[in-house]
Amino acid sequence: MTRVTGRQAIQRLLRGLRRRWARSAASYRYGVAERAVVGAVSKRKPVVRLLLVSDGAEYTSEQQFAPLIRHQRALRRELGIVFRMISQEAALARPGAFFLDYDVVGLKLSFRSKPGDVEKALAHLRKVVDRTTTKLVYFDGDDDQSMQWPNVCEAVDLYVKKHGFADISAYRKAYRATANETKINNLTDYVARLAGDDVPDQTVTSVPVGDECLGKLHVGWNIALDDKIEQLVARPGEAGAQVRSIDILCRAHVPPEAWIAPMRSSAIEAVTRLSSRFNVLAPRSRVSQEEYNLELTRSRICVSPIGYGELCWRDFEAILSGCLLVKPSMDHITTKPNIFVPHSTYIPVNWDYSDLEEKCAFYLENEAERAALASRARSTLLNGLTEEWFLREFSELMARLIPSETSAVRREKAPASAGLSVTFPPAAG
């Protein structure tokens, strides 16, 4: 059982209170009132009102909103953005007049949602949201890069992913999966090919994404900004001050029936083969989060295989703990903050791990280079976890929704109760 210190208990309590406050209607009303006063006194940017609608079904997906809650005050004071969070059920019960108060409406649904329920939510928003004054955004917090429902992308103004394909043409491809899988993406396709599932009746395929939807795609922030990683940053102790007695750590076992098992088992097998040469830890049993964190701080290299998505918490946990991250090549991914710069912040290996021993041996025999690369990765990650970094990224997202040239039009058309537009810096790229 994980021991919880008094300080950790207080931090958890404060985080819980912060989340409850951020999600409350009172918080939203307070933010609007504060911005009205500030705007009247200092003539700063007017308020932009954001409504976030979610079914709350998937914790990892919901974490896409974690930095908004964490930086709620800075978003309000620096960018003039005030947000409110309500459930999908509550949103479906609201009339059109309710949505007039918002400049942007964001939607988030579980990847397990039935197509009929997805269409029901979209139909309601199309009916009640005035698209001449209010923008629609879909926040896709799933682990992979795919767009599960093309009709969602078609219905919104912007589609926000946690990471995407570096080559946009990858979205135009159809991917395969075994017939009982909910998601279909490049990873299910990879596993299907490993298994030799070439018989049509054994697989299902995805629908390629069209150019119109690709123009709406926006890569936002990744899971580095999740609460779990933020809590790890806040813990006391220096990552570089540990005695590292474990050469290679690979804690990645999953049940054999899991569809990701072939990708995980190949990593574990490759690492285990190095045990005659190095001190390797590749267990199949589970441990507490506290013990796992200690393993990371005692390890020189962490091998992090692919799972339900290319990115996982392990990548960021390893880097914050001072490990050198070794991972199947991520060249096909674009993500922010980008800790996947080859041979600069991580070491890429072939997806079949055929070069794992060569790569690990070099850095285990050259500690200074291993430590320097691990330190550079940690600095890169810590920079991406700052308030300033997130405000800049969110500004770029909002710039695609409310560009400065539409401000006058929005002020003229918006109802009296609606938030005014704001000028943001131009979006990057």
Image (cartoon, helix red, strand yellow):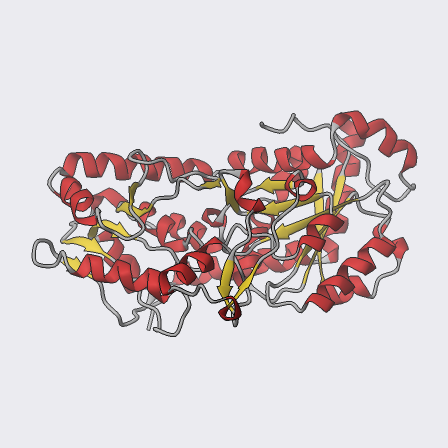
Q: Nearer the viewer, residue 235 or 92?
A: 92
- Residue 320 lies, in percent from the top left, at 33, 46
Residue 14 makes an appearance in the image: no
Task: Please say if 89 is above or below 122.
Answer: below
Q: Look at 85% across and 43% down and name the residue there.
A: 418
Quadrant housing the N terminus: bottom left
Q: Look at 20% across and 57% down and name the residue there.
A: 271
Quadrant of res 289: bottom left
Task: Please say if 126 is above or below 407.
Answer: below
Q: Look at 57% across and 33% down and name the residue there.
A: 392
- Residue 187 lies, in percent from the top left, at 44, 56
Question: Would residue 246 appear left or right of 163 to someone viewing this image?
Answer: left
Q: Residue furthest front?
A: 199
Question: Would residue 103 appear left or right of 325 to someone viewing this image?
Answer: right
Q: Nearer the viewer, residue 179 or 146?
A: 179
Question: Would residue 291 appear left or right of 407 to someone viewing this image?
Answer: left
Q: Residue furthest left?
A: 276
- Residue 318 lies, in percent from the top left, at 31, 50
Residue 392 makes an appearance in the image: yes
Quadrant housing the C terminus: top right
- Residue 223 lies, in percent from the top left, at 48, 50
Q: Look at 91% across and 36% down and name the residue there.
A: 413
Q: Nearer the viewer, residue 341 or 34?
A: 341
